[in-house]
Structure formats: C-alpha cells, structure tokens
Image: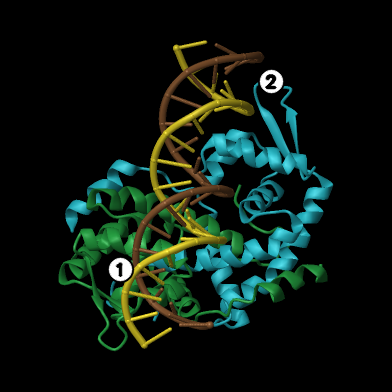
Chain colours: A cyan, B green, C brown, D yellow
Amino acid sequence: MSPLPSDPSEHRSGALLDHLARRMRLRSESVLAPLGLRPRHLVALTVLRDGGGTSQQALASTLEMDSTNIVGLLNELEAKHLIERRRSPEDRRRHVVELTESGAKHLNQAECALAGAEDEVLGALQPAERETLYELLRRAASTTPVVCTEALRADVDRC
Amino acid sequence: MSPLPSDPSEHRSGALLDHLARRMRLRSESVLAPLGLRPRHLVALTVLRDGGGTSQQALASTLEMDSTNIVGLLNELEAKHLIERRRSPEDRRRHVVELTESGAKHLNQAECALAGAEDEVLGALQPAERETLYELLRRAASTTPVVCTEALRADVDRC
DNA sequence: TATTGTTATACTCTATAACTATA
DNA sequence: TATAGTTATAGAGTATAACAATA
C-alpha cells in the first residue's frame, strides 16, 4: 500500500513529495537531535552557506517562510554561534546574516550524519538513480516560483 | 540563492525534498481550500484509493502518522462523506476505512486542480524530466522503510 | 494481557497584528 | 510613508497518556 495515483496519465508528484519529505524529516529529527539541531535549522544553514550573507527578508523569501519565524530560527542559531548577525553599513535597518566557521563545520557534520537517514528513505533507489533524483530536485529548487494564489484558485473551476 | 550543498560529492537530497515539499504544500493549500480540503486530506484519500479498505492502524503506519491524528483526519473526511468506516466482521475492534464514490470523484477533481500548482513548483523541469522525477519518487515511496532510530542516532558518531 | 480506536491535553510550528528603528 | 526587524499572540499540526471495547 502506497500513495500512488491510480491513473498513470495523471502522475501528480505533490502527494509523493509530501510523503517522502515527511519520512525524511521524521528520521532527520532523530539524527539531528544529538547535535541540538532540527531539520529547519539545517535548511537555513544550507541556504546561508550557498547564498552567502543575506538579509533576513531575503532569507524569508527564499525559504518561503514568514519573516517573524525567521527571527526565532536565527535567534536559536545565533545562540549556538552557528550564524552571525551584523548591521548592514549601507542600510542600518538590515541585518546581514552569515554562517560562522563553527556553523559551516556543524553543517558538514550534520550532513554526514544524515546520510544514514537518506539511505533508509531512498533505499529503493540505486546510487545512479539517487543522483538523478538529486539533480532533478536541485534544478526544480533553484528557481523561485512566482506566487500567484488567485490564478491557482481559478484552476479548480476547470475540473 | 537556493539550498544546495556546496560539495558535489555529498548530494544530500533531504533539504531539497523538504524545501520543494514545502513549496508544493503552500500552493496546494490555496488550490484545495475552495474544495474544503487540505494537503493532508489528499494524501490520505490517495492512499485509500490505491490501498483499498484498510484499518486505521495500517493507515497510520503507511502515513507514518500517530494513530490519534488519524482519528481526527478521518472524522473530517467522514463528515464530508468522502470515506466510510465499517466495523470489520472478522475483528470487531477494527474499522475498515474505504473511499466512497463521492470521495473518489472529489479526489480526481482535486488532483486535476493541483496540476497548476505542480506546474509552478516544477516549472524548471521539462515534461520528460517530470515523468522521471515522478517515477523515482513513486519507487522510493513504494517501500516502507524500517524505522530504527537508535541505529540512526549512532551515525552521528562517525562524523 | 494485548490490540484497536478514542478522548483529553500539552507541545511545537506557523501566521497575523502591532510595535521600534531606520530610510 | 515605506521598509527591516522584533514581539506578542492565536491558530493549526502533532505527540503523549489514559480510557473503552474487543480479542
């Protein structure tokens, strides 16, 4: 029993994505707990490593999270000295958020620890297939889709 | 800026899965709201369509959700007459949960409506690539991974 | 005694609104 | 007036514990 659409012509990936992400998250929580981190922390650290110093608003936009939740998230990471907040010299309203050296180290350690969780969740796929999956996910995630709720709502009328 | 590991040899898909699933979920909520459904409902309906009549415990195991949350979820779906609960004749403790005709119809309608959301989130991929992605996700989801928290926790020591 | 389902409850995650400071 | 960040708070999602019915 698994969440697959019965009509092969449909092939909606949404439910599958949701399901696998949940499985991965449940296992990641166990793996990251000893490090004092949660999956959400890891996503933020990853973005900061690859995106460099950005404002909190830019971070909120990238993660599609409410900026109020970014505050608490960064507070926790800052308390662990994994990130740093500096006032931007150009615009003193902005906080430039950057990964610390310790943050980068902890991120690498966490990613290594997560290999086991991923092996478990993606165990049905061979290494080459996992690589393909990674590449597809990476490309899909690299674009920031335009949010247009009204247009999406209208879609339901077609059905 | 996007959540990609910087070291190509790592290729951890966990954060990417989390990120894309979140994007999909945010859009799905908008699409499903007019139908009175939420993403979680759709996952359950999909499993029921493909898995046939199962007990609530089996459903909890498949979805890796706590069984107490299954109760509320099914209550909502039953109130909308999208699923039915029947006492199992063999074991009167069990509730056999099945999709109603109306439930199957609403599920198809919802999946059709979700096409727009998926187009938005997976817009960077071509149709053939989306098909590949779907197939990989489907195969990964079709196995129920063994939950072994202790073994996972031990992984962190390697890093 | 063990299992299925349920209720009650607490805890976490997330979003909305109002506030401060800078522009 | 508008923007970046923060705080307070309410809502949804989830898990833990105790219970009822059945095996």
Does dot 1 land on a helix, a strand or a loop? helix
Q: On screen, A139 above or below B141? A: above
Which part of the image, by quadrant, shows the C terminus of chain A? Answer: bottom left
Of the pair B122 and A108, the residue shown nearer to us? A108
Q: Residue furthest left?
A: B101
Report the side of B85 relative to A4 (left or right): left
Displayed quadrant of residue B54: bottom left
The residue tagged 2 is A92
The picture places residue A80, in percent across and down from the top left corner, at 78, 44
Report the residue at 65% width, 54% height from top.
A38
Callout 2: few (<14), some (14-19), or many (20+) C-alpha neighbours within 10 Å?
A: few
What is the three-letter code of the residue carrying label 2?
Arg
> Is residue A5 among what the camera can see?
no
Q: What is the number of the mark on residue B99?
A: none
Does dot 2 land on a helix, a strand or a loop? loop
> Is residue B49 among what the camera can see?
yes
Q: Chain of mark 1?
A: B
The residue tagged 1 is B45
What is the three-letter code of the residue carrying label 1?
Leu
Q: CA distance from mark 2 to mark 1?
A: 50 Å
- Callout 2 and callout 1 share a chain: no
Q: Chain of mark 2?
A: A
Report the residue at 62% width, 35% height from top.
A71
Callout 1: few (<14), some (14-19), or many (20+) C-alpha neighbours within 10 Å?
A: many
Of the pair A76 and B142, the residue shown nearer to us? A76
Q: On screen, C20 above or below A128? A: above
